[in-house]
Image: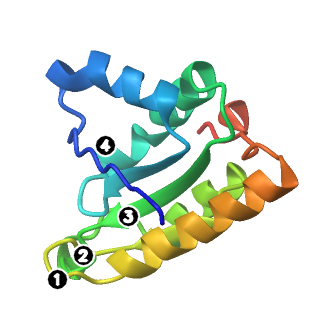
Amino acid sequence: MVDFQIWNTSCERAYEPMVEEFYFGSHAIVVVYDITNRESFEQVDIHFSKIEKLNPYICTIALCGNKSDLEDERQVSYKEGKQLADCYGIQTFFETSAKEGTNITPLFTDLFKVHLESVKASKVSPKCIDQFKG
C-alpha cells in the first residue's frame, strides 16, 4: 500500500515556510507550473533549488505543466517544459489539465514507479540548477 499526501500551496507567499517543511520530509515532489503563465515557469528553478537545499532524502521530482486545456492561451511550449525536465534529470514530465483530469493518473503512476526505481538503486535525482539559466 502506498500513502500519498498531496499539498497544493499554489506558490502563495503565506505558505512559503510550510512549503519548506514539506520539501524537507518529502520523498516525492511534483513541481507544477501554469503553461499559460510564463512567470510561473520561470519560478520553477527556485523550487528545485530549495528542494536541493532542504531535502536530504532520496527525493524523486516530477515536473508538470498544468492547464493543458487552455492551449490557445499557452505561453510555455511543451518543448520548453521537457527541456527543463531533461536538464534537471527529471524522468517524470507531463502536461496536465486538473480541470479535465488529463494525465493526472499517469503523472502520479510514473512518479511512483520512478521513485521506487531510485530507492532500489539508491540514487538521488540529479540536479543542474546552475546549468539552466538564460
Q: Tell me the kind of residue under disc 4.
A: Glu
Seen at 18% across and 30% down, the residue is 12
> Crowding near pointer 2: few (<14 within 10 Å), some, many (20+)?
some
| Nearer the camera: disc 4 or disc 3 | 3
Q: Which mark is residue 97?
A: 2
- The residue wearing badge 4 is 39
Label 2 – label 3 distance at C-alpha:
9 Å
Q: On the rendered image, what quadrant is the C terminus found in? A: top right
What residue occupies the far front of the structure in this picture?
A: 1
Seen at 46% across and 30% down, the residue is 23
Q: Tell me the kind of residue under disc 1.
A: Glu
Point out the tag, 4 or 1, that comes first from the N-terminus: 4
Q: Secondary structure at mark 1?
A: loop
- The residue wearing badge 3 is 65
Q: Is residue 92 above or below residue 9?
A: below
> Looking at the picture, how far across and down is residue 14, in whole percent?
15, 20
The answer to the question of whether label 1 and label 2 lie on touching residues, with beta carbons closer than 8 A, is yes
- The residue wearing badge 1 is 100
> Crowding near pointer 4: few (<14 within 10 Å), some, many (20+)?
few
Q: Secondary structure at mark 2?
A: loop
Point out the tag, 2 or 4, that comes first from the N-terminus: 4
Label 1 – label 3 distance at C-alpha:
14 Å
Point out the tag, 4 or 3, that comes first from the N-terminus: 4
Q: Secondary structure at mark 4?
A: helix
Residue 22, image quadrant: top left
| Nearer the camera: disc 4 or disc 1 | 1
The answer to the question of whether label 2 and label 4 lie on touching residues, with beta carbons closer than 8 A, is no
Seen at 62% across and 42% down, the residue is 59
Q: Secondary structure at mark 3?
A: strand
| Nearer the camera: disc 1 or disc 3 | 1
